[in-house]
Amino acid sequence: MSEGGKSVEVTRTYLQLTEPDDLRPAHRDDERVRVERALDCPASFHRYLYAEVGRLYHWIDRLDWTDEEIRAYLANPDLSLWVMYCEGVPAGYFELLKCEDGSTEIAYFGLLQEFLGRGLGKHLLTVAVERAWAEGANRVWLHTCTLDDEAALPNYLKRGFVPFKQETYFTTISPDEVLRRQ
């Protein structure tokens, strides 16, 4: 355990949609909100999205990636990166990763802190699922954990996702994260 950190038990829940009709969409009809595929995304912009969206949720795995590692990751032909803009400002993003079994994982998904609580998450999730089906998925899945935003799991369930696996693990969170979770 790092100095001043706290070891916490985390529950990770895997959820899926097995048919396109299982999605309960929640579109936002607002011309100020758009979702676009990010082609040739600069490493710095990807790093920004990952760090800012994940800042409150213990997203740490990629924080020390080099520009070369990010570029190699983004060059994967089975990966697509999508960014939601609200009045021209990045508000959130998702990554779709095609898997060998024909499924598509919503590998990363979330909003920047300033855009939480506006109903944008359900719209972004709807778009992510629709894109996954449009790109040929035979199943769409994702995972969330108890370190994620409290609205994440309810949003997934309301959109029709069904849990299929659960696991627990331990991680160490920083003193700042400990304070935020109290």
Image (tube, rainbow, N blue to C red):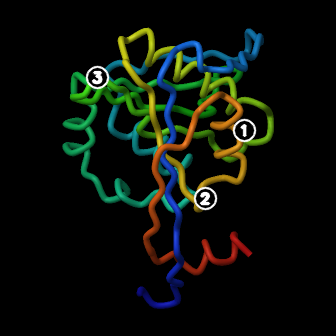
Mark 1 neighbour class, 10 Å CA radius: few under 14, some 14 to 19, many 20 or more: some
Q: Quadrant of residue 105?
A: top left
- Mark found first going from the N terminus, 1 or 2: 2
Q: Secondary structure at mark 1?
A: helix
Residue position marked by numbered label 3 in the rendering: 102
- Mark found first going from the N terminus, 2 or 3: 2
**Distance of mark 1 from mark 3, alpha carbons?**
32 Å
Q: Secondary structure at mark 2?
A: loop
Q: Is residue 58 left or right of residue 77?
A: right
Q: Residue at x 42, y 31 (%)?
A: 95
Hey, which residue is sitting farthest right in the picture?
A: 118
Residue position marked by numbered label 2 in the rendering: 56
* Amino acid under disc 1: Phe
Residue position marked by numbered label 1 in the rendering: 115
Looking at the rendering, in which quadrant would you find the C terminus? bottom right
* Amino acid under disc 3: Gly
Q: Is residue 153 left or right of residue 167?
A: right
**Distance of mark 1 from mark 2, alpha carbons?**
13 Å
Q: Please tell me which residue lies in front, 133 or 122.
A: 133
- Mark found first going from the N terminus, 1 or 3: 3
Residue 42 vertical position relative to residue 148 in the rendered view, above or below: above
